[in-house]
Image (cartoon, helix red, strand yellow):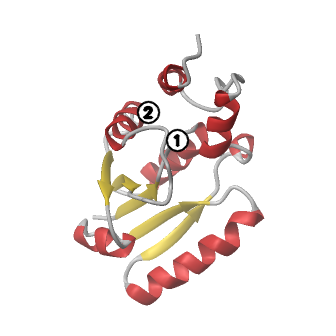
Amino acid sequence: MKIAIYPGTFDPITFGHIDIIGRAATLFDEVIVAISQNSEKKSLFSDAERIALISESVKKWQNVSVDQFEGLLVDYAAIQKANAIIRGLRALSDFEFEFKMALMNRALKDEITTLFLMPHAKFTHVSSSLVREVASLKGDVSSLVPNHVELAIKTKFNIE
């Protein structure tokens, strides 16, 4: 079986993430969307809330599941018997960081391949941090996230 891990904080999940997940779901037998624990980032949503939001967003794909992990991504991938790590590239500016991470992951576990996927062009400007910022200023994020995510964001920011 070909298993891929798509790691991230997904705080919140966006249409760009969902586009990448859909592309990965056609390439792999199983895709695990894995929420990484990052103590340096202050999340808008708790782990449980992000799992629920992501699960609702990916329910149309039978081969996609949601999980969370701590520690090294390659160790988690090995435990899950994953062949690949999926990373999204929105712009050239993402590439240098992602390239270095891919090389480090390869150095740690050579048998796990990193695969870069690009979202549809209409989502290349979308990031979770921009969604949070726009929403916090009461801007419209309806074209950036699914309805259930927009509602959750509005609830967090007390927006009617």
Circles 2, 1 touching at the beta carbon (< 8 Å): yes
Horizontally, residue 117 falls left or right of residue 30, namely right
Give the structural element (helix, strand or loop) at label 1. helix
Residue 57, disc: 2
> Looking at the picture, how far across and down is residue 120, in whole percent?
68, 45
Give the residue displayed 58% in from the left and 31% down from the top. 145
Residue 82 image-quadrant placement: bottom left
Q: Is residue 65 above or below residue 41?
A: above
Give the residue displayed 75% in from the left and 65% down from the top. 93
Which mark is first along the chain, 1 or 2?
1
Q: Return the residue nearer the eye: 52 or 112.
A: 52
Q: Amino acid at mark 2?
A: Ser
Q: Return the residue nearer the eye: 156 or 35.
A: 156
> Looking at the picture, how far across and down is residue 86, in whole percent?
49, 62
Rounded to the nearest angstrom, the CA distance separating label 2 from label 1 is 7 Å
> Looking at the picture, how far across and down is residue 156, in whole percent?
50, 25
Give the residue displayed 33% in from the left and 64% down from the top. 2
Q: Residues within 10 Å of mark 2 (few under 14, many from 20)?
A: many
Give the structural element (helix, strand or loop) at label 2. helix
Q: Amino acid at mark 1?
A: Ile
How many circles with numbers are drawn on the protein? 2
Give the residue displayed 37% in from the left and 39% down from the top. 61
Image quadrant in which the N terminus is located: bottom left
Residue 136 image-quadrant placement: top right
Q: Residues within 10 Å of mark 1 (few under 14, many from 20)?
A: some
The residue that label 1 is drawn on is 18
